[in-house]
Image: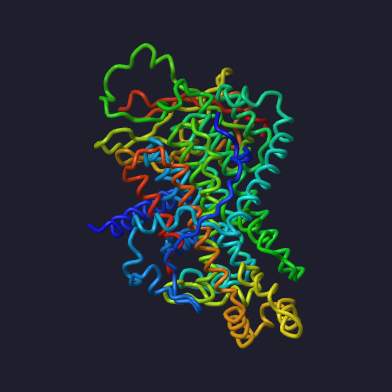
């Protein structure tokens, strides 16, 4: 397991040898910077030479010893702080090895409000991804081929965080998509159905918007799409769902769930 | 192509790669004029890209790819630039990389808000690490960043407190502790640690790079402070001797305070007790001359060199077992570049 930033370093060896100074930055009083190491200034800019290296290694000074001691002290302080912090957790390893959902929950518990809000978005994507690395990845294979049984069984569910109030400002949900293809530019045109509620209430499909639409992603890069949803003033309360998909892309589809409160 | 040119090309490439990714991470919505349009101001002013370069090259050394390191590099750059924006407000600085600071151009309120936005926006690439690196590595990187930011604000608090209360009985130890916290963790130690985590998929003990990163960062900061005193303004891009006007507790100023007595010391302490606006250019030049006379500049130069030498030694200890490929060579060249630069 990698150590935390507070992990202890190695013991500090004493350094005693002397060596040539390295090239200085600029002419300074009492120091011949332009000819340090006997070289013209422009040559000093060159990368490490064997002479430089030999001169530098083993260079000893009081300030280096002081620095080493201070680092040890600060790291030791950090270990105490880390122990205190980790004491609040029941099992750090368990948290670190936990499922995505547990991890994000852990994240949310300790984070600041703003982080909490942002993490909701990550939770949506992670929690609902059968394979998070592939959910929003667009490969170079033929997207029009028939979906396999397993892929069709893994349509992700995106739950809009919180409860939306009719007539209020649109809620926005950012999503990231990656284009794995080495050469193909992906142009993704999003579309969605109306939002349906089990008792039959509906919210028009136009309540959901995608920006940009289409989303164009260059090969080997990622793009962001912002899904915004406005609940009309007259919408009835309930649990609504709709289907979102990308035109002509079999693997890019999701069900969106949203809770609507009394207006 | 000469080795030095190849190194600079690579440095620029990593810088441009992360700057491009940083710009694409800025929300494309209002308010643009007083917020989002101002975020690229500092990142596109020709910074050197040390942090992303350290992160990406270390990631490559441990077998990772640029793509795996880019999000974390963007987060590092955003945090770094947020620090710069806030730093300029706190220090009342007027120039940054040859142009007016954000606070000088738009006022403190807007500058602070832009810095805040940079901090918040930097969270997203770290969150997106989950999708490409998996939750464990993403969480480890997040832990590194949390520690990095905390150390940096603690270091900044130390320095601001010294100036606020006009603390003048400082030692080299105090300076090194402050610079470890304020600069080294976020300029060198964490970029390297994060790069190693990314490349090794959290399998490497990242504390083995701490001494290398600390020595390198301290040498870098002392060099930066020296350039502020005796650099070429056209190359350096900041006010020359601005640190003296700000009363910044550099290694050289601490040395000077410890090597003056009587009326001179009294005058120096009184100068530092005043607000920046009440410190004259004449007194600033007097202090620079004093630093030359008492050997404070020489002490800074010598300390930077010693720490750089120690950094190179630690580099071979930490990376000596890794294959001697272009990525390791780049990192090695980075050491001399960082402390021999003149801008």
Q: Residue furthest front?
A: A17
Relative vertical location of residue A77 with respect to residue B306 in this rendering, above or below: above
Q: Residue at x 55, y 54 (%)?
A: A16
The foreground one among B254 and A163 is B254
Q: Position of residue A96 (x, y in %)?
A: 59, 26
Residue at 61% from the left image edge and 41% from the top image edge = A11
Quadrant holding the N terminus of chain A: top right
Can you tell which quarter of the image residue B343 is in? Answer: bottom left
Residue B96: % across, % down: 50, 69
Image-based side of A165 in relation to A229, left or right: right
**Residue under the image location 40 percent in, 43 percent down:** A212
Seen in the image, is B40 located left or right of residue A90? Answer: left
- Most foreground residue, A127 or B243: B243
Name the image quarter holding the C terminus of chain A: top right
The residue sitting at the left extreme is: B1
Image x and y of residue B272, in percent: 71, 76
Q: Does the image show residue B338?
A: yes
Name above or below for residue A156 compared with residue B277. above
Q: Residue at x 24, y 37 (%)?
A: A183
């Amino acid at each position: 397991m990698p150590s935390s930033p507070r992990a202890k370093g190695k013991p500090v060896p004493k350094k005693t040898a002397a060596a040539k100074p390295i090239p200085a930055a600029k002419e300074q009083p009492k120091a011949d910077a332009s000819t340090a190491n006997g070289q013209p200034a422009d040559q000093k800019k060159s990368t490490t030479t064997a002479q430089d290296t030999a001169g530098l290694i083993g260079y000893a000074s009081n300030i280096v010893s002081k620095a080493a001691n201070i680092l040890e002290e600060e790291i030791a302080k950090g270990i105490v702080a880390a122990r205190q912090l980790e004491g609040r957790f029941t099992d750090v390893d368990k948290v670190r090895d936990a499922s995505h959902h547990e991890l994000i929950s852990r994240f949310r518990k300790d984070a600041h409000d703003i982080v909490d809000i942002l993490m909701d978005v990550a939770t949506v994507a992670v929690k609902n991804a059968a394979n998070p690395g592939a959910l929003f990845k667009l490969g170079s294979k033929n997207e029009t081929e028939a979906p396999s049984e397993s892929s069709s069984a893994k349509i992700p569910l995106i739950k809009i965080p919180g409860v939306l109030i009719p007539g209020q400002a649109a809620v926005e949900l950012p999503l990231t998509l990656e284009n794995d293809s080495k050469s193909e530019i992906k142009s993704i045109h999003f579309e969605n159905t109306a939002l349906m509620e089990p008792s039959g209430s509906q919210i028009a499909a136009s309540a959901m918007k995608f920006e940009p639409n289409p989303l164009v992603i260059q090969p080997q890069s990622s793009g962001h799409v912002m899904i915004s949803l406005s609940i009309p003033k007259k919408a009835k309360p309930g649990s609504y769902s709709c289907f979102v998909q990308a035109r002509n892309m079999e693997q890019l589809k999701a069900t969106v769930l949203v809770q609507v409160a009394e207006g | 192509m000469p080795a030095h040119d190849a190194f600079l090309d690579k440095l620029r490439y990593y810088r441009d790669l992360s700057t491009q990714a940083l710009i694409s991470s800025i929300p494309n919505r209002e308010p643009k004029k007083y917020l989002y349009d101002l975020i690229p101001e500092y990142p596109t002013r020709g910074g050197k890209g040390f942090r992303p370069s350290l992160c990406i090259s270390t990631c490559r050394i441990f077998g990772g790819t640029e793509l795996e390191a880019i999000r974390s590099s963007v987060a590092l750059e955003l945090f770094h630039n947020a620090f710069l924006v806030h730093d300029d407000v706190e220090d009342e600085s007027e120039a940054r990389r040859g142009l007016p600071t954000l606070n000088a151009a738009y006022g403190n309120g807007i500058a602070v808000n832009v810095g805040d936005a940079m901090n918040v926006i930097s969270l997203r690439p770290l969150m997106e690490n989950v999708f490409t690196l998996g939750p464990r590595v993403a969480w480890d990187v997040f832990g590194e960043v949390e520690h990095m930011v905390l150390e940096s604000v603690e270091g900044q608090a130390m320095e601001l407190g010294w100036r606020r209360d006009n603390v003048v009985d400082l030692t080299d130890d105090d300076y090194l502790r402050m610079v470890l916290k304020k600069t080294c963790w976020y300029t060198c130690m964490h970029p390297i640690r994060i790069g190693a985590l990314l490349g090794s998929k959290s399998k490497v003990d990242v504390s083995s790079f701490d001494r290398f990163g600390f020595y390198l960062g301290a040498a870098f900061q002392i060099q930066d402070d020296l350039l502020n005193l005796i650099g070429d303004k056209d190359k350096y891009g900041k006010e020359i001797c601005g640190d003296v006007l700000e009363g910044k507790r550099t290694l050289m100023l601490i040395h000077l305070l410890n090597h003056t007595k009587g009326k001179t010391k009294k005058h120096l302490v009184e100068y530092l007790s005043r607000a920046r606006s009440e410190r004259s250019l004449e007194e600033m030049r007097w202090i620079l001359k004093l630093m030359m006379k008492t050997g404070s500049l020489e002490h800074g130069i010598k300390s930077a060199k010693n720490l750089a030498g120690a950094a190179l030694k630690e580099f071979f200890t930490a990376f000596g077992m890794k294959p001697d490929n272009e990525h390791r060579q780049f990192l090695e060249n980075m050491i001399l570049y960082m402390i021999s630069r003149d801008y």
